[in-house]
Amino acid sequence: MPALLPVFLTAAQVMTASPLVLVASKVPSFNVEPTCRSALAATNTPGRDIQACLRDEQNARNKLDETWNSFPAKEQANCLRLSLLDGQPSYVEVLTCLEIAEEAKKDAATTGFGSPR
């Protein structure tokens, strides 16, 4: 099944696309260098440079490549939208969002609180 997402997405494309269009067979490609540069400019963490940020993003991308199809399309779309809200996409944000959504569903199923969606 071919991916239904373009290789590169702008925030406007994701925000205006219907959830049906956001279903993809593979992880979309982001240019995370501006995201890393912006994050580094906003923080002053000793020993943290752009290469460390890019490594974190690549590690998250690799994990998403391995697990992408295990997440429901609705969660994929929601997490992509959230990551692109500020125009600075991040694989780390997408992965974290998907992992939190999965844990929330598990918690709801075991505790009876909330409704797993």
Image (cartoon, rainbow, N blue to C red):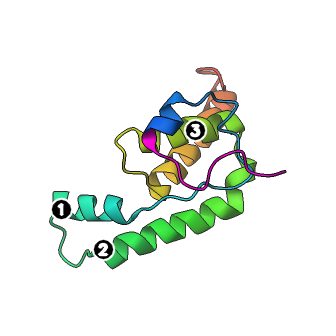
Residue at 62% across / 27% down in the picture?
A: 18
| Element type at mark 2 | helix
Q: Is residue 3 left or right of residue 40?
A: right
Residue, disc 2: 50
Crowding at label 2, few (<14), some or many (≥20) Cα neighbours within 10 Å? some
27 up-or-down from 87: above or below: below
x, y percent for residue 66: 70, 63
Crowding at label 3, few (<14), some or many (≥20) Cα neighbours within 10 Å? many
**Nearest to viewer (mark 1 / mark 3):** 1
Q: Considering depth in this image, is 72 or 101 the residue closer to the camera?
A: 72
Between marks 1 and 2, how big is the CA–CA gap?
Answer: 10 Å
Residue at 54% across / 54% down in the picture?
A: 8
Extreme-right residue of the structure: 1
Considering only order in the chain, which callout, 2 or 1, is on the residue closer to the N terminus? 1
- For the stretch drawn in magenta, the main secondary structure is loop
Considering only order in the chain, which callout, 3 or 2, is on the residue closer to the N terminus? 2
Residue, disc 3: 101
As for residue 2 lying within the magenta part, the answer is: yes
As for residue 64 lying within the magenta part, the answer is: no
Tag 3: residue type?
Ala
Instruction: Kindly identify which numbered label has been placed on residue 87.
Output: none
Tag 2: residue type?
Ile
x, y percent for residue 38: 25, 58
Extreme-left residue of the structure: 44
Instruction: Kindly identify which numbered label has been placed on residue 41.
Output: 1
Where, by quadrant of the figure, is residue 23 drawn? top right
Looking at the figure, which quarter contains the C terminus? Answer: top right
Between marks 2 and 3, how big is the CA–CA gap?
Answer: 28 Å
Magenta residues span: 1-11
Q: Is residue 44 left or right of residue 108?
A: left
Tag 1: residue type?
Ala
Between marks 1 and 3, how big is the CA–CA gap?
Answer: 29 Å
